Image: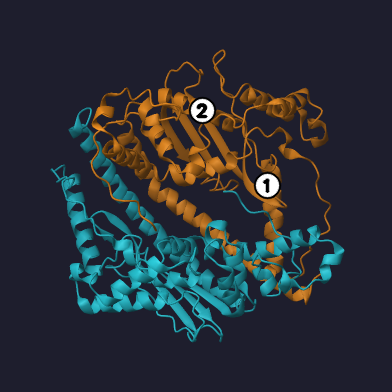
Chain colours: A cyan, B orange
Amino acid sequence: MADAAPEEVKARFEELSVLEAEFDDAELELIRKSNELNTPLWKKRAEVIAKIPHFWTLVFEQAPTEFDSFILPSDAQIFAECFETLEVTRFEIDNPKGSPRSVSIKFGFGDNEYFEDKVLEKKFWFRKTKDWEGLVSEPVRINWKKGKDPTEGFTEAAFKLFEAKKKNGSSKSKHSDLPEYKQLVKMIEESTEASPSFFAWFAFVSDYRWVSPEESEQTEKEDAERLAKMKRGEKVDDDEDEEDDETDYQETEVYPQGGEIATLIAEDLWPSAIKYYKSSHEQDDEDLSDLDVEDMDEDEDESGDEIDIRGLVGKGRAGSPPNKKQRKA
Amino acid sequence: MADAAPEEVKARFEELSVLEAEFDDAELELIRKSNELNTPLWKKRAEVIAKIPHFWTLVFEQAPTEFDSFILPSDAQIFAECFETLEVTRFEIDNPKGSPRSVSIKFGFGDNEYFEDKVLEKKFWFRKTKDWEGLVSEPVRINWKKGKDPTEGFTEAAFKLFEAKKKNGSSKSKHSDLPEYKQLVKMIEESTEASPSFFAWFAFVSDYRWVSPEESEQTEKEDAERLAKMKRGEKVDDDEDEEDDETDYQETEVYPQGGEIATLIAEDLWPSAIKYYKSSHEQDDEDLSDLDVEDMDEDEDESGDEIDIRGLVGKGRAGSPPNKKQRKA
């Protein structure tokens, strides 16, 4: 199918692949350096934030639309009532078998009417297969109070399927015969919700498929061998003629954009939290200047259909020092 | 207007501001570290790329939509014909009075029918004012061949205004009386183009206003003093009661999204170039599998209204080794 000199094209691609691996190493070193420089600052920040009610709820509300669109009005209500702390850590950063890209996102909650848990920790492992790499996660069980589950059973069903798969072992073919598998597929098919509750994110497994640490380690090893061959100028195999895997791994995925959300939290909301918090106050100023005087007496909690976390947490009229415009670079 | 304890709110904001400055220092150190780690790799990459025709044109074409939307079909035609090299450098990284965020974007071109220049370098300086920080730039003169200017005079008009302002000195009030100013305002008002040529980006000055190095240095100094006071727990002035500056600095801005484009090139296209180049080949594979056999004989250059750089540069059917899916984290 190639129009000219396929060997030449292949040689160029190999050179680029060797380079990509070197760029990747540089990126990992930068993640480590960033973690080293920022960890003490995140600690200090946590101390300041502890004095500020609803800090993280306000940050979530001020996040860019691409994140904000995942928070339903009913989720915002829950966050406003009991979301207290957020902590993001690179829990495999010093683990030679792990990845600095693996990330834990830990939510702390106060007593509330929705669930029993005080902490919900969602861990994402950076793993590789022959033709994919990315974040995978295990479903987190949430102990919902009776009648209070906004995911309508999805976190529980995903958790139970994951447990059943573990018991079932590595025989992939049988997973789809598990009653928990069939149950979850049925629930997904029958669901009429246009968009799931943000809390269904805790059930996320992968935007591809679950990848075990063993498979990932094996892939790393093979990649390293392939790379070493390329560097020595030896012939490496094409894997073009592999048969396609037709399994629909996404059939039981409750929250396909889960990895995207993890990345948005870890790489935007978490590092830029102060900026977003400040902009929630900046917006107050703008809102105020747009209001008519007679509007000022209305109850903020009755602000219509659109969700307004600042209203929910009673921050609609807080005093706010001026703030520099957001940097563009 | 504050609902409760404005002094308390102010104190919290000051603590956060002190922290923000420390996060900012960490970020600058990371930019330096990144530059140190990646510069040798970018050098190696340039050597490999030199063997690959149309590398950068293919990267531009594969860039995310948010960038791609800035390239008109007529721009794509020019790039396909003569765009040869791209180089991004942090030219103030070792300059204590400059910023590691300042960036130079240098395009190299082959002989072509459009302009005389072999190199077009657009430099962006990271500068600060009391209430803004971001990238500013000087308009770059492009020596268009007769009748070949896709910006229809905008790069030249912006360049001439900038020169006239320099001669005019710092008396802001007079700038709008300059004939070059009036001329450019008139051109912008009368322009009927829905979206400007990408080449008008070379005329970009600022998404706020031009900021001189002296003003920026003065701001840095004042910011540092303010910060030192905060750290010592001393009272700092609010600047809430400053009058608003009503000048419309954007009246003569030819390409308001110029800073955004600089950031996309420097922080996405440049570091991820290999990924985008490879995905241009991946897409070939997908395109091919979608094609009927009889379509294979059609002339690739006649692919209809939609611009197709891969068609323009004759890369529609290059052989291509398989490629890992893009990482999600």
Residue nearer the viewer, A149 or B49 = A149
Single out the mark in the foreground, 2 or 1: 2
* Residue count near mark 1 (Cα–Cα under 10 Å), binned few <14, some 14–19, many ≥20: some
Q: Which residue is mark 2?
A: B120
> Which chain contains the residue that carries disc 1?
B
Name the residue: 33% across, 69% down. A185
Q: Is residue A306 above or below residue B177?
A: below
Q: Secondary structure at mark 1?
A: helix
Residue A276: x and y in percent read: 61, 63
Name the residue: 33% across, 74% down. A183
Q: Are marks 2 and 1 on the same chain?
A: yes
Res. A188 in view: yes
Residue B228: x and y in percent read: 68, 65
Res. B167 in view: no
> Which chain contains the residue that carries disc 2?
B
* Residue count near mark 2 (Cα–Cα under 10 Å), binned few <14, some 14–19, many ≥20: some
The disc placed on residue B216 is 1
Residue nearer the viewer, A307 or A140 = A307
- Tag 2: amino acid: Leu
Q: Is residue A283 above or below residue B250?
A: below
| Residue A137, image quadrant | bottom left
Image-based side of B112 in relation to B282, left or right: right
Instruction: Give the Cα separation between the discs numbered 2 and 1.
Output: 26 Å
Image-based side of B178 in relation to A193, left or right: right
Residue nearer the viewer, A251 or B261 = A251
